[in-house]
């Protein structure tokens, strides 16, 4: 982002608001000590590939019944973490518990509980959607007589019933994505690990995915979604874990993210008078270099926004638009990007 | 091969032998469905059929031509052997089928694991309840079955060779059995290598090199190794009863000599020390396993074919100078080594050890949760 003249003040303000906790802070609310642990808990997990430390001492918690977003820039270690949670990759250090089970020693039990959707689609192209799901059901050793109806249900769920007997190679990327999701759900897992599930989906399918994931979470599954489409995650996720350079850098719920203030974008017919008024009010803002001249600034809550808008109107500033500049999670994400530089 | 290790997994995951075999069968079904739907496999099968047919026809035609030439005259007392053309056609077709099989099997097997890995579908299997052993066995057996289709296609030509004369159905059965086993070994080597390497191209080339090492490398290293095995043997003077001691190379001769005189140190290559290299050659294994009439102590009359020559040559090497050098230890040697001690189990055993080792290493690389990944590979 290219900042205007006033960026120093605005940046400092942002820095004050976004107080990033250290990576080794205790885990968030979670039934760590009560009953059989549900959901996924990873503590102090590290994994390196040769000299590359993909994940370093990462803490992660995805409670049952919630959608937890895993957010971070490319190469932050999201996929590596998901592979470890899915019991495909062993951590060099740290512990992982999937519904209280250890993936390294209770492999089969963990796999009955985990559904994993990889970021690489990995579709057997010459098989039909129905055959792929049937094969997966067999690999999970589901009761044979129940497989056809289970497969049909899932094909309906992901709206592939019409294409069920087409070879998977003729499916579009979005359709293959939905097939991949159905594949992850075939054995009715209690934990769903989705690596970039929304990439390649058209807007309609995204809405469907969102509704589906909310329903699955309400059914008591622990759902982990890694994604870059942050505005989507605002709508789905109950909580978010931000990772960067292999470390957990922030954990927050979406409510917390919203409560920490939001950046608003304001545009006016006359940017000059808008800037003058904002300076007069003593607010830190920056001039955005987008297609339309606009300024942006941090506001702590909705009341602040209402007050500011009223003030601007009363001061005869010709306001054209006044809206949140980004999603709540995107705000936090951008502070990570700043930190990375 | 990894039976014991996979056995321990049975107990770990609480599935019986039937469950374990069921998982293997599911993997085979998945693999074969994909193979049967790819056009390339049928094209290869068609080319294979045409090539084998061409070789058979050429062999048969050339034999007919030479027969026709012979009956027209110009034949200096040559007597056609009792095996007739069947032996020749059978042997040439068999040699080609083995050659083609060794060439086709790597292509069918050596991308089984890393092809899936780069396509992102291997991890899909690994995340399920399938164990690494089930995935590996399934992939191996599917590759083997696909390769066996090629052998089935060539069966008519082997039968044709037998029908043309002189040979029994047993020859076809033993030959097909040994071809099946050899193809299986190459498939196992291919699947093992594909599990250990990152890129399909690399593993296919490596498997071809492994096949080349078995077919040519064993002969070359045997030849070079023989030079390093110079040793001595105590032998005395052979007195040949007639004046034709020079026997054409590769052909056995009767022990037409007596031994006399003091034992002396003779410098000889101790071929038996490096003969195991030769025994690993697929052609030697197949040739040695195929029965041929026992000619031990037989006459000068020789009409054995290539199979017999390969088998006898390899057994000479295994027997070493102790058993083949004239008048070694003062004993006349029967130049013809009988089949009482077959050597193909040695070669096959060594091949199985090689294939088993590669499969075991491949199995280790499929273990999840993975601790070490091969360089340049991703789980998914």
Image: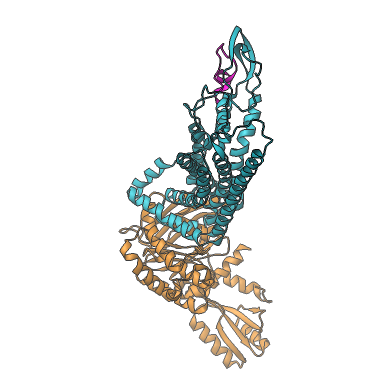
Chain colours: A orange, B cyan
Q: Tell me which residue sits at (55%, 88%) in the image.
A: A309
Relative to A279, residue B296 above or below: above
Relative to A257, residue A74 above or below: above
Q: Nearer the viewer, residue A115 or A191?
A: A115
Residue A295 inside the magenta-drawn segment? no
Q: Count numbered badges in the picture.
A: 0
Q: Nearer the viewer, residue B158 or A160?
A: B158
Image coordinates of residue A78 in percent, x first then y, are 52, 61
Quadrant location of residue A31?
A: bottom left
Q: Tell me which residue sits at (55%, 55%) in the image.
A: B45
Q: Nearer the viewer, residue A44 or B369?
A: B369
Mainly helix, strand or loop, the magenta region? loop
Image coordinates of residue B159 in percent, x first then y, are 50, 46
Image coordinates of residue A128 in percent, x first then y, are 46, 67
Residue B185, visible in the rendered structure: no
Q: Quadrant of the N terminus of chain B?
A: top left
> Does residue B267 appear to the left or right of B177 in the view shown?
right
Image coordinates of residue A223 in percent, x first then y, are 42, 66
> Does residue B85 appear to the left or right of B125 in the view shown?
right
Boundaries of the magenta span: B318-335
Residue B363, visible in the rendered structure: yes
Q: Nearer the viewer, residue B287 or B24?
A: B287
Q: Seen from this angle, which residue lies furthest top?
A: B262
Residue B327 inside the magenta-drawn segment? yes
Q: Seen from this angle, which residue lies furthest front?
A: B72
């Amino acid at each position: 982002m290219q900042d205007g003249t006033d960026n120093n003040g605005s940046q400092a303000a942002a820095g004050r608001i976004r107080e990033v906790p250290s990576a080794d802070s205790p885990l968030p609310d979670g039934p760590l000590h009560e009953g059989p642990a549900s959901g996924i808990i990873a503590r102090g997990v590290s994994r390196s590939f040769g000299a590359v430390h993909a994940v370093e001492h990462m803490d992660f918690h995805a409670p049952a019944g919630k959608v937890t977003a895993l957010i971070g820039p490319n190469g932050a270690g999201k996929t590596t973490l998901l592979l470890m949670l899915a019991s495909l990759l062993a951590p060099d250090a740290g512990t992982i518990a999937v519904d209280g089970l250890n993936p390294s020693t209770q492999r089969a039990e963990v796999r009955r509980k985990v559904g994993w959707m990889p970021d690489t689609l990995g579709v057997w192209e010459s098989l039909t959607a129905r055959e792929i799901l049937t094969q997966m059901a067999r690999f999970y050793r589901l009761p044979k007589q129940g497989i056809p109806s289970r497969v049909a249900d899932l094909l309906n769920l992901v709206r592939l019933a019409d294409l069920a007997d087409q070879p998977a190679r003729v499916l579009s990327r979005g359709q293959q994505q939905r097939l991949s999701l159905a594949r992850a759900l075939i054995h009715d897992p209690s934990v769903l690990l989705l690596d970039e599930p929304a990439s390649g989906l058209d807007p309609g399918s995204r809405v469907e995915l969102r509704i589906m994931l909310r329903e699955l979470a309400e059914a008591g599954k622990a759902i982990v979604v890694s994604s870059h489409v942050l505005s989507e995650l605002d709508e789905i996720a109950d909580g978010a874990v931000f990772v960067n350079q292999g470390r957990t850098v922030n954990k927050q719920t979406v409510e917390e993210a919203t409560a920490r203030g939001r950046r608003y974008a304001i545009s006016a017919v006359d940017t000059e008078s808008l800037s003058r008024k904002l300076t007069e009010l003593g607010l830190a803002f920056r001039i955005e270099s987008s297609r339309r001249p606009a300024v942006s600034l941090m506001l702590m809550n909705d009341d602040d926004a209402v007050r500011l808008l009223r003030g601007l109107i009363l001061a005869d500033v010709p306001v054209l638009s006044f809206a949140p500049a980004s999603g709540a999670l995107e705000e936090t994400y951008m502070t990570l990007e700043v930190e990375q530089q | 091969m990894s039976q014991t290790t996979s056995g321990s997994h049975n107990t770990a995951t609480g599935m019986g032998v039937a469950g374990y075999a069921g998982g293997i069968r599911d993997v085979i079904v998945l693999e074969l469905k994909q193979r049967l739907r790819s056009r390339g496999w049928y094209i290869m099968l068609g080319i294979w059929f045409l090539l084998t047919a061409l070789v058979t026809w050429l062999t048969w035609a050339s034999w007919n031509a030479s027969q026709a030439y012979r009956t027209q005259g110009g034949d200096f007392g040559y007597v056609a052997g009792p095996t007739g053309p069947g032996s020749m056609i059978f042997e040439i077709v068999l040699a080609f089928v083995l050659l083609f099989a060794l060439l086709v099997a790597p292509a069918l097997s050596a991308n089984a694991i890393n092809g899936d890995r780069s396509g992102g579908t291997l991890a899909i299997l690994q995340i399920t309840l399938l164990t690494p052993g089930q995935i590996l066995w399934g992939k191996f057996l599917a590759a083997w079955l696909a390769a066996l289709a090629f052998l089935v296609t060539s069966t008519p030509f082997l039968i044709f060779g037998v029908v043309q004369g002189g040979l029994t159905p047993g020859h076809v059965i033993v030959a097909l059995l040994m071809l099946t086993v050899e193809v299986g070994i190459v498939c196992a080597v291919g699947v093992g290598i594909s599990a250990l390497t990152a890129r399909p191209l690399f593993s296919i080339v490596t498997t071809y090199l492994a096949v080349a090492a078995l077919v040519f490398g064993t002969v070359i290293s045997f030849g070079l190794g023989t030079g390093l095995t110079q040793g001595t043997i105590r032998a005395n003077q052979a007195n040949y009863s007639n004046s034709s001691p020079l026997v054409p190379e590769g052909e056995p001769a009767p022990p037409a000599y007596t031994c006399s005189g003091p034992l002396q140190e003779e410098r000889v290559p101790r071929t038996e020390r490096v003969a195991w290299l030769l025994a690993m050659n697929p052609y030697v294994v197949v040739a040695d396993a195929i029965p041929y009439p026992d000619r031990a102590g037989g006459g000068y009359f020789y009409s054995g074919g290539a199979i017999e020559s390969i088998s006898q040559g390899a057994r000479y090497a295994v027997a070493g100078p102790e058993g083949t050098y004239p008048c070694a230890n003062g004993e006349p040697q029967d130049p013809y080594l009988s089949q009482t001690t077959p050597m193909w189990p040695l070669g096959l055993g060594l091949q199985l050890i090689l294939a088993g080792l590669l499969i075991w290493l491949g199995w280790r690389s499929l273990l999840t949760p993975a601790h070490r990944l091969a360089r340049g590979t991703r789980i998914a």
